[in-house]
Amino acid sequence: MNRFYLYLFVLVVLSCAESDEPTEVISTDISVTSSTNSITWTDDAGLLQQLDNALSYNFGSTLESEIEKQQVFNTDSTEVTASIKFSAGFENVYKDTNPFNNSVTISLIREVPAPQGIELKADGSGSTYELITSVLAPDANPIETPDCNHASFGRHIDEIFDNDINTNVFRFFMHTTPDNDRCINFDRQRNEIKTYDQSPDNLKGVQNETVVYKWKFKLPSGFQTSPNFTHLHQLKSVGGNLASMPMYTLTARKSSPDRLELRYAETDTQVTLTQTPITPFLNTWVEVTETIIYGTNGTYAIEIKSINDGSVLFEYSNNSIINWRPNADFVRPKWGIYRSLINSQDLRNEEVLFADFSITEL
């Protein structure tokens, strides 16, 4: 019995002695190469796919499971370094015979997509309604005029050449009688163009989107306004219970003195964000830039400049304002003349000029 235990002890000692012997390190070459020095990209998914196509890894005598691959981007994503190394637990099993080819750096060039937008410019052809429709809602009807009740006058929007800005412009007509609101409402008058549900998607403002609206307009000398409202521009939600109330309105109002107002409604009640006397806007071309981020934590800015001398006549900005309503589908712009007839004695026949509309999604 004692001899048996002595024999077993000797076997254990010999086994331990054998396991303490150093393992032979395997020499091999692992490397990473790239088929290109630079990659032009627009989105993350596309970039990763291009990297996958460009990079080639050589595992030498190792298994892929014994290798660790890394891609490290610099802080502004203008370059990426791809590298290869032995995984933890295999650094002492293998020896890299050429450690200088274990990484490669690729320059990254981000291509910013061109802003998606449209322009609506008068061309003087005489097919004004057709031109407006072709841009704002092809094969639909983005025009709301009083033609139905005043057919004898003809179309209430046409085009003329304007010498002040040396281009063709749109002329919007409004008559105290018999014009109304599309033969639907008779206490007001409407002559507007718009985008709506039949318009292309890039003309509809949606949540978390930045949109820039630009246009030019000219109010005539002696322009007469209603004490109720004379809207020149609106941003309106479509969908939900608040669709009838404009979110933003640029309106002219009879007062002492007459004024131009920027109105805002988060829900169904409007407030005036800012206002200014209307006199500087009469008989002069102005250019409007309106920038909005749609969302429950949005931003809004508007600037109106004199085209003649570049002076700023009207401006407002807010970096934290609610620009989205519950259950809204999208927001659409409207331009033209939309005025109350409740105090028609304060009004006259008007011709308001508009030009160079644009809608750009950033």
Image (tube, grey):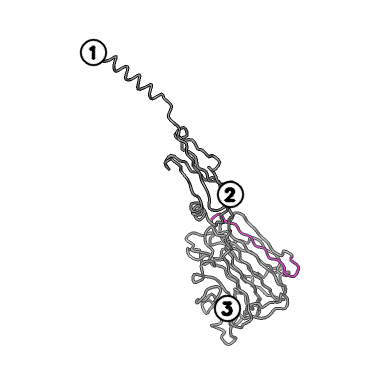
Where in the figure is residue 229, as x and y percent of width and height? 61, 70
- Mark 3 or mark 1, which is nearer to you? 1
Q: Residue at x 56, y 74 (%)?
A: 135
Label 3 crowd (10 A; few <14 / some 14-19 / many >=20): some
Say which residue label 2 marks.
79
- Name the image quarter holding residue 165: bottom right
Q: Which numbered marker is on residue 1?
A: 1
As displayed, is residue 144 above or below residue 11?
below
Where in the figure is residue 330, as x and y percent of width and height? 51, 64
Q: Which residues are magenta?
A: 296-310
Residue lying furthest left in this view? 1
Instruction: Identify residue type, mark 2.
Output: Glu
Quadrant location, the N terminus: top left
Of pointers 1 and 2, the one earlier in the residue sequence: 1
Instruction: Identify residue type, mark 3.
Output: Leu
Residue lying furthest right in this view? 309
User: Main SS of the magenta segment?
Assistant: strand
Where in the figure is residue 273, as x and y percent of width and height? 64, 60
Say which residue label 3 marks.
131
Of pointers 3 and 2, the one earlier in the residue sequence: 2
Secondary structure under the numbered disc 1 in the rendered image: loop
